[in-house]
Image: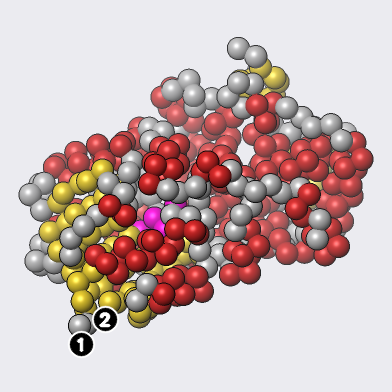
Amino acid sequence: MTTTTLAPGKDIDALRWPDVVAVPNSPLRAAVAERLLKRAVRSLPIRVTTADGQRFGAGGRSDPDLHLIRPSDFYQRLAASGLIGFGEAYLAGDWESDDVAGVLTVLASSLATLVPPLLQRLRSAVVHPRPSTEDNTVDGSRDNIHRHYDLSNDLFQLFLDRSMTYSSALFEADPDHSAEDLSTAQHRKIDRLLDIAGVTEGSAVLEIGTGWGELAIRAASRGARVTTVTISTEQAELATKRIAEAGCTGQVEVRLQDYREVTGSFDAIVSIEMIEAVGANHWDEYFRAIERLLKPGGRAGLQAITMPHDRMIASMNTYTWIVKYIFPGGQLPSVTSVRQSSNDAGLKVTSEFTFGLHYAETLRRWRAWFEDNAEQVQALSEDFDVAFRRMWSLYLAYSEAGFRSHYLDVVQFGLTKGTVR
């Protein structure tokens, strides 16, 4: 195995992590990146320290600290590929922090001003377009989903709550000060969406994106008949088992099927945080499928992670760290795009409910459990090496920061299909 040093006693497999192992070599661009970082943090509540004793940034002792272990490598990566390089530098161990989410929250809060306007015009020289091979066609979607959701059911069980719900919870009170059990908060979120969709006894319900079956179980407990579709083989297997254990097999059908291939007619459709995996160029197919499958007068409940519309437009075809390492083919919508796509498909948005800070707390708990169970994660597979575990910790912290900084939000939308005239 070809390796490079991550930190004393820790190695990275160069075959699995080629872009983490390889350090770019462009001294001039690295010098520019260093100047930009120092300029960006001089007014931010953050402390940057380096292994050779440098200190800069406006932060005090109580503010998050970004420690550059290998400053030269860090700046080379940052200069070569921007935020992708920033993430790869963390995987490589070039930087560290006692409060990774805090560092990222400060940076996310100032994202629009981190790079001077003049240099923002040169953005295309640093960022790269998304690979065409990750387009969410029927076959492409299966490949993309496989790379994340089919990693291992055992992996997800190590950091999700007992409901196995991989989406934002909804806490009863202020999420930053809530001691509420996460499963209870997840059930509140699910039940609210089922209420939006009008799911009651006898309802014929379609769920787009099964997850591990908890929503289908909750809907069945209301007396509904549920068809739930997923293209993750791992999720379908465990969801089927959990549904059987809950005594709901007679009311729930789990299908390994793309949403575009579903036929039938349903009183209600529910979909939690699945639109993010659809791809912007397929949003019209997604909303047309909902309209086609809903009975006249039917209702849908959609939960979506959203981002500002201008940032969505600017990053639409950008290859980001999250797309490269976590969610290939993924694209977050904006509230505006959901409204427009719904309207174009013949659906009416009847309600919108936002609760982004609840997602920040959900993610904080997931990351704490993931890191507490690091040894168990490693024991699951040789593929879950130190770079993988750092990647997942960074992903969870990165996502938490997005919600804490209000750069991201999560919204439950109510949709209706008009009655026949």
Going by the numbered disc 2, the residue's amino acid type is Gly
Image location (x, y in percent) of residue 270: 28, 63
Residue 238 is a magenta residue: no
Instruction: Tell which tag, 2 or 1, sits nearer the viewer.
Output: 1
Going by the numbered disc 1, the residue's amino acid type is Arg
Residues under numbered marks 2 and 1 in contact, where contact means CB atoms less than 8 Å apart: yes
20 left or right, relative to 203: right
Residue 193 shows in the view:
no
353 left or right, relative to 105: left
Q: Is residue 289 above or below residue 89?
A: below
Task: Determine the residue positioned at 45% across, 33% down.
Answer: 373
Marker disc for residue 421: 1
Image location (x, y in percent) of residue 195: 25, 71
Of residues 353 and 137, which is closer to you in this image? 137
Of residues 286 and 52, which is closer to you in this image? 286
Of residues 302 and 328, which is closer to you in this image? 328
Image location (x, y in percent) of residue 258: 31, 49
Give the residues drawn in magenta, as a range.
272-277
Marker disc for residue 144: none
Label 1: state its secondary structure.
loop
307 left or right, relative to 246: right
Image location (x, y in percent) of residue 63: 72, 54
Query: Which residue is identified by label 2?
Result: 418
